[in-house]
Image (spheres, coloured by chain):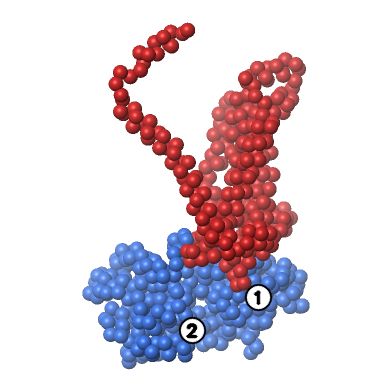
Amino acid sequence: MTHRRGGTGKTPLVPPRALSLVLGLVAALMLAGCGRDSGNDTSGSAGDLSGRVSADGSSTVGPYVTAAAEKFRGVQSGVQVTVGISGTGGGFERFCRGETDLSDASRQIEDDERAACEQKGVDFVELQVANDGIANVVNTENDWATCLTVEQLSKIWMPGSKVSSWRDVDASFPDEKLTLAGPGTDSGTFDFFTAAINGEEGASRSDYNASENDNVTVQAVSGDKGGLGYFGLSYAEQNESKLKTLEVDDGDGCVAPNSDTVQSGAYKPLSRPLFVYVKMEALARPEVKAFLEFMLDNETEIAGSALFVPLTSEQLQKARDVLDQA
Amino acid sequence: VSSAELSAPALRASRRRYGEDVIKGMLALCAFVSVATTVGIVVALLLPALDFFREISVVDFLTGKDWSPLFEPAHFGVLPLVAGTLVVTLWACLVALPLGLGAAIYLSEYARPRVRSVLKPALEVLAGIPTVVFGFFALTFVTPLLRDLGVEVEIFNALAAGLVMGVLLIPIVASLSEDAMVAVPRELRDGAYALGSTRLQVSTRVVVPAAISGVTASFVLAISRAVGETMIVLIACGQRPNLTFDARQGMETMTAFIGATGAGDVPTGSIEYKTIFAVGLTLFVLTLVMNLFAIRLVRRFRQAYE
């Protein structure tokens, strides 16, 4: 059950946000032993770098950086990467105080955050590391819905919504009972979806089957003819045979979610780029630079294991250029 | 005056046996650990729960019909969770109490010793099956079966979870009730038979009433277990707070909420975190009240044969 995103989720009753750093460290340490034997294809198993790379920020990007850190330990076991999940805003606060080397962000840095960084003399560069897309899925027996507008999705999912039949969504749909499933409030997917569809992060009706385990959502939607749910696009693609993925219309016609439309941003409003911001001062340290280069070199694989859509070759080249010129 | 009493002084140790004292102390410690644990649990539950009730009024909590503590805006009405627990427990009892009692009567009054020696252990094996297995059994077997039978259940539903939980509880009811029935003095049965009673009359009018305190105890234990069972409902009943008594729908029970939220990322000390304890306390009070009620019931109907 490794399909959840946006949470550490390995321990019950996870301690406060501040301690999530420690958790990331522990996770990295635990995985230290596992990755070693895979490193014999490169220079050796141990690596010659040492030191610490600290990252904090978005709970959506967190799993991506954690996945990168796990793999990185296979080649550079002397480097410890700690990954916190204080949220994009919380991550930038710490980043601009100079506390972290990397800031994980599910959106671009805002002007006031940029100003805060400047004030403290924190110079940084922005790297796009992956693309994120959310798929709306229905039962394979659902032969009436192929595309929903953003208004329809919002009508279904907004706080206090009483929509309980597909007919309430669109008059042309049958009077089939609508059963909803989706991620719980811990998930970065939940934050993104609610912000994009309902206009406010965390604003959602609550009477749906909420689970941090995406597989539960798959079960719920594939088990009920009138089921509707959402999760990361990669997971929908992995379960293609069990579910039908809906197109979304943001006013410019229906767009199907797939790697191309998510990478280009044409699949609106449920796709977005994911970023890692790097402190210039930290980039001068060989272990930080090596980690980021490793991350970009293995971008496709890491994005896959964290259930994101990888970068296009142009996006990847751009990120490489940013890193080289910095 | 028996000879044992006369020789009693000779049994007294001539000197203090320290080994004996150590063993006695260790045994006392064993007994004390369970008491101390219970006290510890109550305190650990009570403190964060009281903290919770400083922010959310008890009345809103107990009468609210909307449960969404992790959402914006948050609502803290526990009734949907209580409904979930009650519906699942009701269906579990509908299965477990009659079947368990029937099995107990059969084992105690009808079954030949050889049949009994096979049947009773077989029944108890049922109690040893991990509940997570029961949960997936409910989700992947019972729910589709119910649909094939024409019951229009949602994929996650209280009915399948309740029925399967009932099966889990059968051995508890059967085993404890049977123990109570076997303990009924033989003379009572013989007396009834001498008056011309049939086996059924002996079972239902003599043995069961005589064993009523043990039977009730088994029922109470089964109900408490049903109220507290987590894994089956987490897997098969869903995580949708739903104030209804329609068991065909998906519901969230108190234990499922605690289980799912406790395993999530809620920050310690937040109001979301404290809801876990408030719900836990509600669960605790519910089972406590039930147990007290059952003890009174047993005292009232108990027939002592000495």
Q: Position of residue B165 (x, y in %)?
A: 61, 47
Q: Chain of mark 2?
A: A
Q: Residue at x 54, y 78 (%)?
A: A192
List x then y, in percent, for residue A9.
Answer: 46, 64
Q: Is disc 2 placed on a helix, strand or loop?
A: loop
Looking at the picture, how far across and down is residue A77, in whole percent?
28, 70
Q: What residue type is disc 1 on? A: Met
Dividing the image into 4 quarters, which one contains the C terminus of chain A? bottom left
Is residue A188 at least partly visible in the picture?
yes
Outermost residue to the front:
B54
The span from disc 1 to disc 2 (Cα, nearest Å) is 23 Å
The answer to whether one can see residue B105 in this image is no
Q: Nearer the viewer, residue A57 or A48?
A: A57
Q: Place residue A166 in its image quadrant.
A: bottom right
The crowd level at tag 1 (other Cα within 10 Å; few <14, some 14-19, many 20+) is many
Name the one closer to the observer, A225 or A89: A89
From this view, report whether residue B214 is shown above or below residue B144: above
Please tell me which residue is depicted at 62% across the width and 48% down the height of the picture. Answer: B286
Q: Residue at x 76, y 70 (%)?
A: A175
Contact between labelled residues 2 and 1, with CB atoms less than 8 Å apart: no
Q: Earlier in the sequence, mark 1 or mark 2?
A: 2
Identify the residue under disc 1: A158
Residue at screen point 77% across, 78% down: A171
Q: Chain of mark 1?
A: A
- The residue most toward the bottom is A325
In the shown orientation, is residue A51 left or right of residue A4?
left
Residue B25, compared with residue B225, is above or below; it is above
* Chain A, chosen colour in render: blue
- The residue beneath circle 2 is A107
Image quadrant where residue B257 sits? bottom right
Q: Please tell me whether mark 1 sits on a helix, a strand or a loop.
A: loop
